[in-house]
């Protein structure tokens, strides 16, 4: 729990890297967590997976190009990217657990 708090504080301090590209860190984590759930879902056909992925993007008002730009920006900041990826993993795990209930 303490590690999560430290990560949240560090993310808040680095918010401008994703915000400068039109998305806060929390929004980025949310959308990427949802996309990870779709990517990791078993037994989906490629067509269904693509449809669900597009649905997540549409629901969140994000384009694939925006996410690619954010990815390129984050590649220049690996420590920040690692923190975001940890948050994305946690978000995806919570969403998966919620679906299983």
Image (spheres, rainbow, N blue to C red):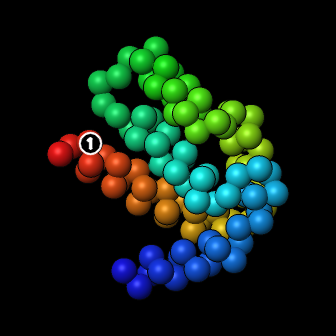
**In the displayed structure, does residue 26 sit left or right of residue 2?**
right
Identity of the residue drawn at 68% across and 33% down: 64
Q: Position of residue 81 (x, y in %)?
A: 64, 62
Could you tell me if residue 46 is visible in this image? Answer: no
Nearest the viewer among 21 and 78 is 21
Figure quadrant of residue 90: bottom left
Nearest the viewer among 99 and 75 is 99
Identity of the residue drawn at 74% across and 40% down: 66
Nearest the viewer among 12 and 35 is 12
Q: Position of residue 94 (x, y in %)?
A: 33, 55
Q: Position of residue 79 (x, y in %)?
A: 66, 71
**In the displayed structure, does residue 73 sit left or right of residue 89?**
right
| Relative to 81, residue 46 above or below | above
Figure quadrant of residue 67: top right
Quadrant (top left/top right/bottom left/bottom right) for the N terminus: bottom left
Which residue in the protein does label 1 denote? 99
* SS state under label 1: helix
Identity of the residue drawn at 49% across and 39% down: 35
Could you tell me if residue 35 is visible in this image? Answer: yes
């Amino acid at each position: 729990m303490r590690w999560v708090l430290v990560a949240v504080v560090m993310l808040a301090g680095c918010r401008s890297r994703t915000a400068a590209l039109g998305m806060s860190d929390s929004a980025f984590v949310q959308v990427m967590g949802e996309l990870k759930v779709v990517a990791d879902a078993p037994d989906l056909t490629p067509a269904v997976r693509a449809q669900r992925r597009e649905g997540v993007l549409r629901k969140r008002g994000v384009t694939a190009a925006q996410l690619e730009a954010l990815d390129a920006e984050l590649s220049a900041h690996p420590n920040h990217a690692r923190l975001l990826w940890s948050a994305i993993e946690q978000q995806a795990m919570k969403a998966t657990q919620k679906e299983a209930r």
